Amino acid sequence: MKYQFSQKIDSLQPSAIREILKATADPSVISFAAGNPAPEAFPVETVQKIAAEILQENPVLALQYSVTEGYTPLRDRLAVHVKERYGIGQDFDQVLVVSGAQQGICLTAHCLVDDGDTIICESPSFIGSLNAFRSFRSQLVGVEMDDDGINIEKLEAALKANPRTKFIYTIPNFQNPTGITMSLEKRREVYRLALQYGVMILEDNPYGELRIKGEPVPTIKSLDTEGIVIYCGSFSKVLSPGLRVGYVVAPREIVAKLTVAKQCADVHTTILSQLICDKFLAEYDFDAHIKGLQDIYRKKANLMIGEIDKKFNPAVSHTDPEGGLFLWCTLPEGADMMAFCQAAVENHVAVVPGTAFLTDESEPTRSVRLNYSTPTDEQIVKGIDILGGLTYKLF
């Protein structure tokens, strides 16, 4: 039988990251291609204890259907959490619990974007979001990044040239894939331009707690007095991605529509996972837990950067992230980036080609993304040594 797929899905291609990860099934391959938290970052014993207590004390609540908006105590606790930590939340805002921040991103596009509408994204940007946006048949417009975030002049030019823009998508903290943090000045300018041109902002902040150096920068949502920012947060990088618990903070009219869309998607986020997150926030030292994560990632980032600086051809440049899980390496002029990625895999090291993160994958790029959270320290040293040799051999 010849299968007829919808136009929305037929044009989508498998994630380049997922395809590369197939190579990492070989245990001899050192993977810098994933974006997973460090295995040692999971509070396994604490989660085991919390889950056992929940199933002992209130099993029906944990196993029954629940409300789409999310477990009310968790929503209330998150509202306080983001207010105290990030200054987020106006009287017009509400919290919606979603199945990972990825669902919040998908629901936003579902509710705001019609066929042919434009979404302006940083270029490069997170492939999971780009593919979600593509699935709603939107037009993606990429705006290049400076060392301190999106280029403001080019952002305004994109807004002028694309009157059907529905929102600007940005990852201001330790951006995936570049690791870049947007300056406060640029955050204010992004907000000003969105207000001026009548578009929304989708602020994705999955890595915000994972700062390893420098001072925190206010979120764009904390500047939002007019109700134009939709904020996505997540427990994936600070507790466990397998729990699939994220949250959206947005004006109540937006949350109402997101809730209807979520009812069509999954009815509600897994209630046991929500209960675990709520109990972790309520009864355990979250700040101490975050500090432990920051210590883990500071050590790993410093190790990878130190090894790159020692082992790579100086013609290769890289970002110096203040947090998160990634750094971005740019090969010298004339280098064949895909040949470098292929040679890396052939030498049992996996990296992600920069094309995977572009709004237009046909655009040229000489960059690759490296992840330092997932590999062990020994793998970081060995893998960077192998890649370093290739930088001298190929360039």
Image (cartoon, rainbow, N blue to C red):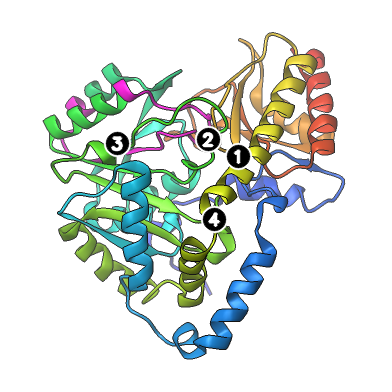
Find the distance from the CA under tag 3 to the CA under tag 1: 22 Å
Q: Relative to 140, is 59 above or below?
A: below
- Of the numbered discs 3 and 2, the one sitting upstream in the chain is 2
Q: Earlier in the sequence, mark 3 or mark 1?
A: 3
- Which residue is located at x 47 percent, y 63 percent? 245
Name the kind of residue labelled 1 in the image. Gln
- Judged from the image, the secondary structure of the residue bearing numbered disc 1 is helix
Q: Is residue 389 left or right of residue 227?
A: right
Q: Is residue 377 visible?
A: yes
The mark found on residue 115 in the picture is none
Q: Amino acid at mark 2?
A: Arg
First-in-chain label (1 vs 4): 4
Residue located beneath label 3 in the image: 220
Question: Which residue is labeled 1 in the image?
Answer: 294
Q: Which residues are magenta?
A: 159-185
- Badge 2: residue crowd in 10 Å (few <14, some 14–19, many ≥20): many
Q: Secondary structure at mark 2?
A: loop
Graded by Cα atoms within 10 Å as few (under 14), some (14 to 19) or many (20 or more), the crowding at tag 1 reads many
Label 1 vs label 4, nearer the camera: 4
Q: CA distance from mark 1 to mark 2?
A: 6 Å
Could you say where residue 335 lies in the image, as x and y percent from the top left? 66, 15
Residue 211, label in figure: 2
Q: Residues within 10 Å of mark 4 (few under 14, many from 20)?
A: few
Please state the horizontal and vertical placement of residue 98, each as a whole percent of the image.
39, 63
Position of 310 relative to 191 (above/below) = above
Q: Is residue 3 visible?
A: no
- What element does badge 3 sit on? loop
How many dots with numbers? 4
Three-letter amino acid code at the position of disc 4: Asp
- In the picture of the structure, the residue carrying the numbered disc 4 is 285
Task: Answer with the quarter of the image where residue 249 lies.
Answer: bottom left
Q: Position of residue 378 (x, y in %)?
A: 85, 37
